[in-house]
């Protein structure tokens, strides 16, 4: 009876030692690749070499402390990141065999360049909205509008100077039809970052002006950005209103008025 117990204990001891050394050996064989960055809206793609025994290089993937479920058994696979907010930090750990090295095929997708980025851009009937990260101290935004075949400055918006995510809303008065805008972020050093062009088809009605022969006041059918130019193309009046006091203009000549992304002419009596 005692001998049987000794044999059983001996077997258990051998099993325990085998498990401990096997576990240690398994961990010793695991390599670890850590990739960090910022989520910009794209997933990561991994090259995953096949080993001699038919298994694959990567054994586990950890994304921001959460393990990736259902790791594909394939020579390449995708790491889904859409559950992460744009601009948030990403840490991806790839556990792999020491007999191979996996490779991130598109590292630039999350590479933190360490500088300013436009994260989100949108334009609605109410105005422009944008979100940024990595702002420098005393940086500012220039809002540009496409009018009369050229980009013109609409407004300067002071930045929040926070390296984390910042949100902005800027109310604009669209002209009828297609409107185009873009943003410039300007650091105090003079470095400039340009946004993509934003387009918006406004549902507002076309603006008209009256009368064609003006004594004192030129009127628009709704408030609008305008410029009044003399015969030499010099801007003599500008603003954003539904009425323009033209009493200061010299009479007996024609003037041009830029408004609602078009140019027309009137006579000052």
Image: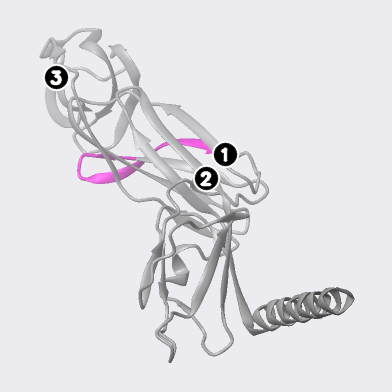
Q: Quadrant of residue 233?
A: top left
- Which of the image's four quarters has the N terminus? bottom right
Q: Is residue 171 left or right of residue 233?
A: right
Q: Which residues are magenta?
A: 145-157
- Please report the residue visible at 71 percent of the width from the left and 76 percent of the height from the top: 19
Is residue 162 or residue 3 the one in the foreground?
Answer: 3
Q: Separation of disc 3 and disc 1 at Cα?
A: 35 Å
Is residue 236 or residue 261 the one in the foreground?
Answer: 261
- Please report the residue visible at 62 percent of the width from the left and 53 percent of the height from the top: 188
Q: Quadrant of residue 226?
A: top left
Local packing at callout 1 (Cα closer than 10 Å; few below 14, some 14-19, many 20+) is: some
Is residue 264 or residue 80 the one in the foreground?
Answer: 80
Which SS type dominates the magenta stretch?
A: strand
Q: Quadrant of residue 18?
A: bottom right
Q: Separation of disc 1 and disc 2 at Cα?
A: 5 Å
Marks 3/1 in contact by CB < 8 Å: the verdict is no
Work out whether mark 2 precedes mark 3 in sequence or the reverse, and give the earlier one. 2
Identify the residue position indicated by label 2 in the image: 132
Identify the residue position indicated by label 1 in the image: 166
Q: Nearer the viewer, mark 2 or mark 3?
A: 2
Marks 1/2 in contact by CB < 8 Å: the verdict is yes
Work out whether mark 1 precedes mark 2 in sequence or the reverse, and give the earlier one. 2
Q: Nearer the viewer, mark 3 or mark 1?
A: 1
Point out residue 43 in the picture as x, y percentages from the top left corner: 41, 59
Secondary structure of residue under mark 3: loop
Q: Which mark is residue 240?
A: none
Secondary structure of residue under mark 1: strand
Identify the residue position indicated by label 3 in the image: 206
């Amino acid at each position: 009876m005692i001998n049987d117990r000794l044999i059983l204990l001996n077997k258990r001891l051998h099993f325990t030692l085998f498990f401990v050394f096997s576990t240690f050996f398994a961990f010793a064989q695991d390599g670890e690749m850590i990739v960090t960055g910022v989520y910009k809206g794209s997933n990561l793609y991994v090259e995953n070499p096949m080993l001699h025994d038919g298994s694959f290089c990567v054994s586990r993937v950890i994304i921001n402390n959460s393990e990736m479920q259902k790791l594909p058994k394939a020579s390449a696979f995708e790491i889904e990141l859409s559950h992460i907010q744009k601009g948030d930090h990403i840490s991806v750990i790839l556990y792999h065999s020491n007999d191979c090295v996996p490779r991130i095929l598109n590292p630039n997708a999350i590479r933190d360049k360490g500088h300013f980025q436009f994260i989100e851009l949108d334009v609605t009937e109410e105005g422009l909205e944008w979100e940024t990260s990595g702002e420098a101290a005393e940086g500012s935004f220039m809002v540009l509008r496409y009018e009369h075949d050229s980009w013109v400055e609409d407004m300067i918006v002071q930045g929040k100077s926070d390296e984390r995510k910042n949100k902005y809303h800027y109310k604009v008065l669209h002209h009828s039809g297609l409107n185009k805008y873009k943003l410039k972020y300007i650091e105090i050093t003079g470095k400039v970052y340009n946004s993509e062009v934003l387009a918006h088809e406004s549902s507002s009605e076309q603006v008209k002006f009256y009368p064609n022969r003006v004594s004192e006041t030129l009127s628009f059918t709704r408030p609008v950005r305008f410029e009044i130019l003399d015969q030499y193309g010099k801007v003599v009046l500008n603003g954003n209103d539904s009425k323009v006091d033209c009493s200061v203009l010299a009479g007996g000549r024609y003037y041009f008025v830029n408004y609602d992304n078009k140019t027309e002419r009137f006579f000052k009596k």
